[in-house]
Amino acid sequence: MSGTLRTVIVRLSQAIPVILGVVVVSFVLTRALPGDPAVYFAGMAADENSIAETRTALGLDKPMAQQFLVYAGDVLAGDLGQSLSTGQPVLQDLMTRLPASLELTLTALVLSCLIAIPLGILAATRPGSVADHLCRVLVTAGVSLPTFFTGVVLIYVFYYLLGVAPSPVGRLDFIYIEPDRITGFYLIDAALVGDWETWGAAAKQLILPAITLSLFTLAPLARMTRAAMLSALSSDYIRTARAAGLTESKVLYAYAFRNALLPVVTTLGMVFSFTLGANVLVEKVFAWPGIGSYAVEALVVSDYAAVQGFVLAMALLFVALNLIIDLTYTLIDPRIGFETR
Amino acid sequence: MTDLSSPSPRLNQDGALAHVAYVLRSNPVTLLAFCMFAVLLVMALFGPYLVPHDPLVSNAAQALQPPSLVHWFGTDNLGRDVFSRVVVAARLDLAISVAAVALSFAIGSVLGSIAGYWGGWLDTVLNRVFDTIMAFPLFVLAMGIVAALGNTVENIVYATAVINIPFYARLVRAEVNIRRNAGFAQAAKLAGNSDLRVLAFHIFPNALPPMMVQVSLNLGWAILNAAGLSFIGLGVRPPTAEWGIMVAEGANFIVSGEWWLAIFPGLSLMFAVFTFNLLGDGLRDIVDPRQRS
């Protein structure tokens, strides 16, 4: 157990330089604005005085190194600046909108795992079958699909032509009242208070954007599952297991799949990077009130503090997720240790 | 690959050509990809001279017409011909992605070669920088860069280039690093070549085949990235014809059933990305038959 603990600590300490790097990059981005950053951060309607005020508030009159320390201190304290368009602290804005994005992203990821992993296994165990061809088509098409375009097509087909999907206007139709905020996830909140009508309405709104996102993430997951299963199935221990007369399902799931799971989990981390980016596009298509559409709205009105806060928050979220994934399989797989590298 | 000595350069070339011909014959999909690429090239190079209508001239009387013989892809809300706009947009979309990929190819090659050949603290520093770039969700980083540098098309190119550099640099670094002390490199040094010369003319060319595959796969991704950025309103400004912004404009009309505004530019985007992905797979078969999937 102490070995595992050490591994965990080593992995945690490896994240520190990355986080530092992320903060440096986002500092450079906030200071790289052409001209005087104070003018940008003060907003369109600023006069001489408020620009000077902003300059002092941001510490722009101090030397660069000191500015960085101030900035890093602010980030550490959770101060990402004020949003010009909402007038609220950026962090607060992001926190109110984060559950919407997470609900969408996680639903999409679960959905694509539920489809991609069985499909990949089927394709690997039955080469040349319908599942194998379907897998190949999905993998090739999936990487060529622009997410925002898939979303538009799905809206056209399921909303306009078939009329089965609700209009793409965000998380809930206007006729429903949003559930009291407990976790911020509508599905969980509505279920907690037992309001199944709202739950159904929220789920209906969620389906199309979640499918759009999951179509995008299906391809790498299915491809990786197929490849990992193929290599696991051709290994010696599978031959031994078969020779020992174990049942096919035992061989497949207890031996091959458990070993194939590791690369799949690794791919999941990479897929998350894509998903967080694609989230922005999908949220714009479906008017989903998450942090992605917050950033897009902020971009349109040149609300720089909000955009940079969003970029930083996404990067930190991504680093945290990768950390969790790494730690998860350190705990799952005893062979992985960082000391030996 | 090329570091294997061959009896004569001519024979080697014939062998390579024969191999290309063999791959194309046995894999018609790759041939198809080359044909699709040719279509894209024609659209990009001669598009403005071929289209039946001016892509920027609006005609309110002809607004929102469904596809017909006069307007093959219909007209948009200002009465502009969608077909002409889709064809003309190919040049801008390809130009952005080719420029971005060329930039990251050049910068990635230089940085990767330096890191792979000399190693040491430079290698460590560069690796840290690449790690940091990769720690961002890449599309989000591109958004941040464009927001910081200013909302122009050039900055879309720079942003797309920056997020692609780590892939090239890592590839070159690995290829250079394994050949750093190879026999042919040492022989070249003994013959009196400087480090820089050995690196540039003897070692680096070996990294080119895998780099070409990477370029092709990357082009599709770069187009998607650039179109995504313009979809959310960065870079390209209306009334410029560009696939991403056309899908964005068309998305407003999709709920009322005017599908042709968004579908055709979206399909062209898919066509382009699909072409580059197929081309990349095909090139990989030609360059490195072992990696065939």
Image (spheres, coloured by chain):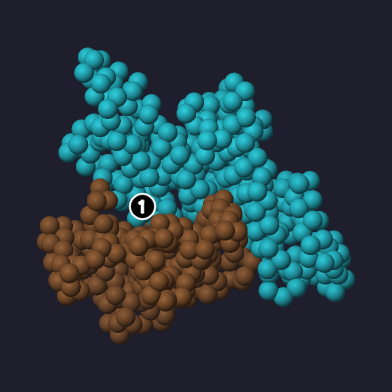
Chain colours: A cyan, B brown
Tell me the kind of residue under disc 1: Val
Q: Position of residue B98 (x, y in %)?
A: 40, 71
Name the residue at 34% across, 66% down: B184
Residue B65 visible in the current orientation: no
Reply above or below: A156 against B172. above
The residue to which callout 1 is attached is A143
What subunit carries mark 1?
A: A
- Image point 38% across, 45% down: which residue? A220
Residue furthest front in the image: B190
Q: Left or right? Give the position of B206 relative to A77.
A: left
Query: Which of the 4 image quadrants contains residue B273?
Result: bottom left
**Total count of labels:** 1
At 56% from the left and 32% from the top, the residue drawn is A327
Instruction: Find residue B82 and report its horizontal and vertical position in percent.
Output: 35, 71
Q: Position of residue B62 (x, y in %)?
A: 36, 75
Task: Indicate the quadrant where residue A40 lies.
Answer: bottom right
Quarter holding residue A317: top right
Residue ID at (30%, 18%): A250
Label 1, residues with CA under 10 Å away: few <14, some 14-19, many ≥20: many
Q: Residue B7: image x %, image y %? A: 17, 69
Residue A329 can be seen, yes or no? yes
Seen as rendered, the residue at the extreme bottom is B49
From the viewer's side, name the closer residue of A204 and A247: A247
Vertical arrangement, residue B4 with respect to residue A34, above or below: above
Q: Nearer the viewer, residue A134 or A120?
A: A120
Q: Nearer the viewer, residue B49 or B93?
A: B93
Question: Is residue B224 toward the left or the right of residue B38 in the image?
Answer: right
For numbered disc 1, what is the local secondary structure? helix
Q: Nearer the viewer, residue A88 or B292?
A: B292
